[in-house]
Amino acid sequence: SGGGGFFGFFGSGGGEGKTTEAEASKVNIREVVSNNDAFLGDIDDVIAEAEEAIKIAEEVEQQQPVKKSLFSAFGFGSGKDRAAEAEERISRLEAKAKEIEQGVENTQQKQASGGGFFSSFGFGGEKAEPVKEVVEEVVGQTTLDGDNIWVEGLKNLFSRTTLSFTPPKMSSTPTTTDAQRSTQKIVTPKKEEPASKASVSESDFLDVVWGAETSARPTLNIAEMMKSFQVQSKEPIEVEKAPTVEKFRTVTLDASLQIKPHPDKVSWGGEDAAFSNGRTFGVFDGVSGAEKVKGKKLYSVILAESMKKKCGKGGLSVVDITNYMNEAKEFADSEGTGASTAVVASIGEDNMLRALNLGDSVCLVLRDGTVAARTREIIHYFDCPYQLGEDSPDRPKDGTTLQTEIYSGDIIVAGSDGVFDNLSDADVCEIVESCPPKAKSAAIAKKIVELSRAVSLDKCAVTPYSTVARGRSGYDAYKSGRGGKVDDISCIVVKAS
């Protein structure tokens, strides 16, 4: 194997001046080996070795040259070790080629114009004489050193294999007779210019092993294969919709009030008063123990009338309610008589309920059958609530406040102590829940007032008032902890929708 083992194997292959007879011989040999399993297995081994050599070549090529050695950049210490490994692989390739060639020659006599087995395929054979390297200086290109020449040689090996090797076409019959050979038309394959630099892909490798156009190579269409795995569902695909954000809407209000005077005060209407105007409403409980001047309006009535005039149809803030209450108090001090507690609430366009409470009246917000919000009573001592009056030190600014959001479906109940001394919060919730969903506010208010009156007259009923009054001095009627409290009853119900 002349030509210098290492570089001679990489030199340009023989066979460039072949005659037509040589080409015919080549075809005959291909037909012989087309069904030779041993041959195909040996080809696989050669290609595997060549592929491994290419991997080494590309490793070296991708690494930038350094001062000491190209292979030292990979951490191998010296390029000589890597070169020795590569040359050992090349020696095995040469030996394998000789072994395959010898095996084929034993099967069929060597054709007169033939050559070695591999030379019949366009590579190998006689080694080309070493050609002096002509280096042209090109701007931006560096001259190859020894290691890079070795890299290019390896890549040239596999490039020439993929470019020159024409795999045998599979024949329908294992052999061809001499008569058939004489009638065969010899087609000289068009010579392709060898690539200046190998470019090997997975497809090229399969072409070498199986043959680009032979029936031995499976025909794979990846796109069609992927389509076969796609499941076509007949059911419509449900696309989850993004949650829709409801546009803000101001609740509408349905408000009604009911007043039932004490049985002994029916002739003159009792001492409670209430109002509802637009989005604001209030309950005023006249203090029965306060001194009254005959001929003057009750303090609670003047407060209710004054607040109704001042509040308007829109919602009010707590500050607005407090200021209007101060003005109403001043007018009641000069024109009215007696004293009164007060609870006033207003639901703004922003659906916020704002309330001011001075005394023991209550405002409840009911939602889904439970109490969602509640004002807090304020008293000096039992049976002496904060109150507004000419002789009272209490002022609107002393009251407790409440601010809470109202939703569609909420029910607001505001009532004097005539309601909440006889009914607990749970009792009020139960009454509201017992009403039909479409019941009007007037029907609910009327039912609350009537039940409050019924309980107030029941001496055996356990009430919030009797529970607190039990055992207190001066409240002997409640020493058993039972009994309702008879009083003026006033109630406002507001339904939000």
Image: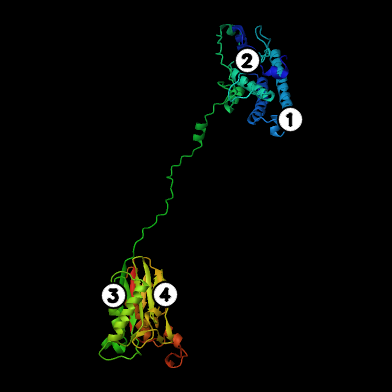
Element class at badge 4:
strand
Q: CA distance from mark 2 to mark 1?
A: 37 Å
Badge 2 vs badge 4, beta-carbon distance below 8 Å: no
Q: CA distance from mark 4 to mark 3?
A: 25 Å
Task: Work out which quarter of the rendered image holds the C terminus and state it.
Answer: bottom left
Badge 2 vs badge 1, beta-carbon distance below 8 Å: no
Mark 3 or 1, nearer chain start: 1
Q: Quadrant of residue 476?
A: bottom left
Residue at which label 1 appears: 78
Q: Amino acid at mark 2?
A: Phe
Mark 4 or 3, nearer chain start: 3
Nearest-to-viewer mark from 3 and 2: 3
The picture places residue 274, in percent across and down from the top left corner, at 31, 79
Q: How many callouts does the rendering have?
A: 4
Nearest-to-viewer mark from 1 and 4: 1
The residue positioned 33% from the left and 87% from the top of the image is 390
Q: Quadrant of residue 441?
A: bottom left
Q: Amino acid at mark 4?
A: Arg
Mark 3 or 2, nearer chain start: 2
Instruction: Decide: is 469 above or below 72.
Output: below
Q: Is residue 337 found left or right of 237 in the rendered image?
A: left
The picture places residue 343, in percent across and down from the top left corner, at 36, 78
Residue at which label 2 appears: 121
Residue at which label 3 appears: 310
Q: Which mark is residue 374?
A: 4
Q: CA distance from mark 2 to mark 4?
A: 101 Å
